[in-house]
Amino acid sequence: MKAPLPDLDADEETMPIDSNDDVVRARQLVRTLAQRCKLSLVDQTKLVTAASELARNTLVYGGGGVLRIGLVRRAGRTGVSAIFDDDGPGIPDIDQALTDGWTSGGGLGLGLSGARRLVDEFTLDTEVGGGTRVAVTKWAR
Amino acid sequence: MTERVPVLKIGDVLLVSIQVDLEDQIVLDLQEDLAGRIVESGARGVVIDITAVEIVDSFVGRMLATTAAISRMLDAETVVVGMRPAVAITLVELGLSLGGVRTALSLEKGLAMLARPGDHRPAQR
């Protein structure tokens, strides 16, 4: 795990993602933070949708994991960052995994690539046998 | 037991109004329930109301597309109504434009769309 992580505020929150219910709860938590950050309605919707894709990936492909989320500040701007971590099998071919339509499971193959389009910053850190971490940030405009 | 989304019958149309934050299993159950109800009731149309739905991710988007395809195979036409503007913007950016799914802005318009014979099932009868 090498990519630098977003610097979350002290009020960050952590929750496990181990069931379909947790995916729903993750969406609600992201929505709450997005509102606190005063993202526009469209940006809230984009971030929550991206989080839903990533939370499902954590559950389905990573075998469950953890979401850390909080506000971030940089150069006078405020944003929301969400970090999804799992100890799953990792992704052997990152470029392939980020290609529209490619899936190793039964999905549409839009989860990672689509989520990346919906946020302002996206980092993917993965290692075969060493888990996967995806961090996303959306800035208030 | 997970909760289920109710499927209502109005004339020859089945109406599904999604009012809960959709958990994946509820989505899969709904798809099965709908297919069964179409055959059992002989419904000619299905309206899925997503007015209350705050986000549609690729899983739910795929459900809408496959439900439309399944209904078509069972001789019923599907219309998705009430999509929020932010949801539409997000879906397109996500890469899902739901090409095979008919949409209408409101329940009223969706029902009217299904009531127009010939309009929604071209060249079939």
Image: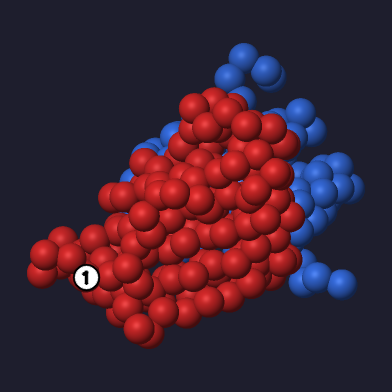
Can residue B76 be spotted in the picture? Answer: no
Is residue B33 shown left or right of residue A52? right
What residue sits right under mark 1 in the picture? A73
Residue drawn 47% across the image and 79% down it: A13
- In the picture, which quadrant includes the C terminus of chain A? bottom left
Vertical arrangement, residue A22 with respect to residue B72, above or below: below
Where residue A18 appears, as percent x and y from the top left, is 71, 66
Residue drawn 61% across the image and 37% down it: A91
Vertical arrangement, residue B37 with respect to residue B44, above or below: below
Where residue A32 appears, as percent x and y from the top left, is 41, 77
Where residue A38 appears, as percent x and y from the top left, is 24, 73
Vertical arrangement, residue A114 with respect to residue A97, above or below: below
Q: Amino acid at mark 1?
A: Arg
In the rendered image of the structure, the colour used to display chain A is red
Quadrant of the image occupied by residue A5: bottom left
Mark 1 surroundings: few (<14), some (14-19) or many (≥20) residues within 10 A: some
The secondary structure type at the circle numbered 1 is strand
In the foreground, A72 or A141? A72
Can residue A122 be spotted in the picture? Answer: yes
Where residue B14 appears, as percent x and y from the top left, is 70, 53
Q: Which chain is blue?
A: B
In the foreground, B123 or A34? A34
User: Which residue is most to the top?
Assistant: B123
User: Which residue is most to the bottom?
Assistant: A11
Residue drawn 69% across the image and 32% down it: A104
Give the chain letter at badge 1.
A
User: Which residue is most to the front?
Assistant: A2
Count of numbered circles in the view: 1
